[in-house]
Image (cartoon, rainbow, N blue to C red):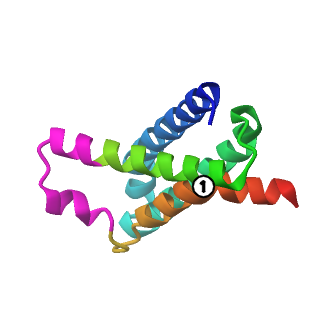
Amino acid sequence: MRMAMLVRALAVWGLILLCAIANGVLREALLIPRLSARPGLLLSGLLLSGLILLLSWWLLPWIGLRGRRAQLLTGLGWLALTLGFEFSFGLLRGRTLDEILAAYRFEGGNLWPLVLLVTACAPWLVGWLRRR
């Protein structure tokens, strides 16, 4: 992968991160208070997954990823960056490992594991859909 593609892929992940933060604010400020926890978490997870797919659809041509291998590696890179951010941010906020890992369970409407799967697969999936 060329350096320009790597920088662009990082920029797209940065946009995904901003969307995830905005989604978290929306979830805590509006969705959960109005809908309750389970529906708020479900809607939040679906919204973020959709945003990741939409950003990938829109920006994959700009990144310039052509092959399946590059698309898979980019998705895995996004996943690694996301996990690194989540664990680092959680630990910096004083959360225990058990508290951090609780977000990785499908409980109470939590779809975070699905969001991670979408993050990892989005470049490949979008590439596959664009080839059809």
Depth check: 89 or 65 in front? 65
Residue beneath the point at 24% across and 62% down: 101
Depth check: 131 or 55 in front? 131
User: Looking at the picture, how far across and down is residue 41, in whole percent?
Assistant: 43, 62
Depth check: 11 or 25 in front? 11
Majority SS type along the magenta span: helix
User: Looking at the picture, how far across and down is residue 99, in whole percent?
Assistant: 18, 59
- Mark 1, Cα crowd under 10 Å, few <14 / some 14-19 / many 20+, is some
Q: Secondary structure at mark 1?
A: helix
* Displayed quadrant of residue 106: bottom left
Give the answer, above or below, for where 98 lies relative to 8.
below
Amino acid marked by disc 1: Leu
Residue beneath the point at 60% across and 49% down: 52
* Displayed quadrant of residue 100: bottom left
Q: Exactly how many numbered labels are in the figure?
A: 1
**Location of the C terminus (image quadrant):** bottom right
Residue 88 lies in the magenta-colored region: yes
Give the answer, above or below, for where 75 lies relative to 41.
above
Q: Which residue has dot 1 on it?
A: 72
User: Looking at the picture, how far across and down is residue 57, in whole percent?
Assistant: 73, 46
The magenta segment: 87-104
Give the answer, above or below, for where 125 lies relative to 94.
below
Residue beneath the point at 53% across and 33% down: 10
Give the answer, above or below, for where 110 lies relative to 3.
below
**Location of the N terminus (image quadrant):** top right
Residue beneath the point at 48% across and 35% down: 18
Q: Is residue 25 left or right of residue 100?
A: right
* Displayed quadrant of residue 40: bottom left
Q: Is residue 17 left or right of residue 107?
A: right
